[in-house]
Image (spheres, rainbow, N blue to C red):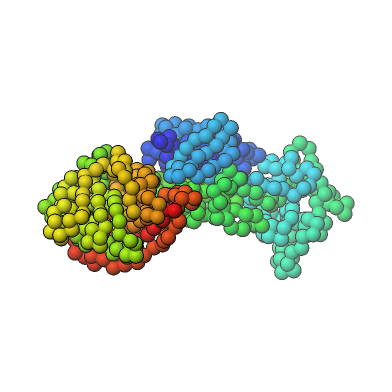
Amino acid sequence: MEVPWDAIIVGGGAAGLSAAQMLGRSKRRTLVVDAGSPRNRFASHMHGVLGHDGRSPAELLEIGRRELEPYGVEVRNASVTHVADEDDVLVVTTPDGTERTRALLLATGITDQLPDVPGLAERWGASVFHCPYCHGWEVRDTRIGVVVAAPAQVHLAFMLRQLSESVTVFLQAGVEIEDADRTRLASRGVDIVDSAVAEVRGAGRSVEDVLTADGRVVPLDALFAGGAPAPHDDAVSPLGLERADMFGMSFIQVDDSGATSHPRVWAAGNVVQPMANVPMAASAGAWAGAHINGFLVGEDFDRAEIARRAWPEQAPADFWEARYEGDGPAWSGQVNATLADAVAGLEPGRSLDLGCGEGADVIHLAQKGWDATGLDISATAIERARQAAADAGAGSAAFLAQDLAEWEPDGHYDLVTASFFHSPVHLDRTAILRRASAAVRPGGHLLVVTHAAAPPWADPEHVRHHTFMSAREEADALALDDADWDEVRVEEVEREAIGPDGRAGHLTDGVVLARRR
């Protein structure tokens, strides 16, 4: 199925738009899904952003969206509610439906969970701030308050003292700070109020003073408060991404490129770096976007290489005839040791071997007293098998060229075998084996010997699309009726063997031997 998007970016803030620009300029089909709630939407201006100092956050995002248009990046105003893993793609759900993508960047930011103080949230971004680098210059040399709701937040007071000689720390209920911090703050004239802020007051969105729990009124011009960062990452929770604790909260864990524990998911910006300002988030987004493109580049080449090596659409008969058309034998001419061991204790009778190749297993059975027949789709293999049987004096061995996809059993057998019955071109192997099992008479046996792992001499072109199953998985795939069959052996067998090229190798065979009741 065609995947419409190379990358979907969830979140259209500085991190998301920067990543989208990198991907768009790399000719990647990119979709940005933005819920329209950036963390800094409460602020009228932003600072510390080179080339954009004093610009409003909304204006920066508007410019960023316009810059994406020449690169074909699509931006949608929506929220993402769910991200699911589906084979080699991710399925992204929005209220309007689902989209499929090869890679995803989460750039959804955080919510600052502010202390529960009346008047605080209403002034957030106007006269109540959280970052000295973003807003400290604008309130320099004024009366600044710092609400400390957790011990780690006292660092704001140390930083703000650089900007004003009038800094007051308010310790919220239950918060204590180290004596060493008290001493250091006092050394530069920072006041510490051991009573929580009960209310922030002032006209409109300005701060004029705060009322403390013990009734004190402290005049102020600005207030800084550190909110607990709550990341917006619920949508990717079904992916089970690895997480790490930070600031008392759980965040998705990423490496330096923004890569998460999922190979197709990255995260950047405040959703994983709550202390990052706008340029830091933009940088992280651009860096993640470049790595996403690098991942896609590698996957594009991997897929192209696979497609180049892929088997053409070819009938099984044509493929296998070409496989045997060389001058020499394709196999060693020796019986498979695992098959010989599995049938050693069985009473000889009538046997049938599916995909017999050049006939070594059938000849062995004939020499052990079986009335043995072998079927193979390749006429050349059958001719070689007949000649090998004649040379070995195995007169009871018979061979027929037969397309097993169309084959129907013509009788009942005491033993039906299939050794390494694999095909790189399409052949409904399980259906053929089930059909063959119906030809086993009561008291007879079905024996399937498979490669539980690739032989060391196997041509990579022949096995690269093959899934090697354990004996248990093979038996389960056959799904023989328990009412009619008893499992005699279901196991892996280790052995040494000589390959068709004369090389010795270690093999792991899967053995499924079942007896019909």
Q: Residue at x 37, y 54 (%)?
A: 444
Q: Is residue 159 left or right of residue 509?
A: right
Nearer-the-camera pick, 187 or 282:
282
Occupied quadrant, residue 123: top right
Q: Up-down: is 304 above or below 457?
A: above
Q: Residue at x 72, y 58 (%)?
A: 150
Q: Residue at x 66, y 57 (%)?
A: 248
Residue 347 seen in the current view: yes
Q: Up-down: is 160 above or below 318?
A: below
Residue 139 seen in the current view: no
Residue 264, given in percent of the width and then of the height, sits at 46, 47
Q: Quadrant of the N terminus?
A: top left
Nearer-the-camera pick, 366 or 181:
366
Residue at the far right in the pictured view: 215
Residue 169, given in percent of the width and then of the height, sits at 75, 57
Nearer-the-camera pick, 488 or 265:
488
Q: Residue at x 25, y 60 (%)?
A: 369
Residue at the far left in the pictured view: 327
Residue 91, given in percent of the width and then of the height, sits at 50, 39
Q: Is residue 19 left or right of residue 436?
A: right
Q: Is residue 427 left or right of residue 145?
A: left
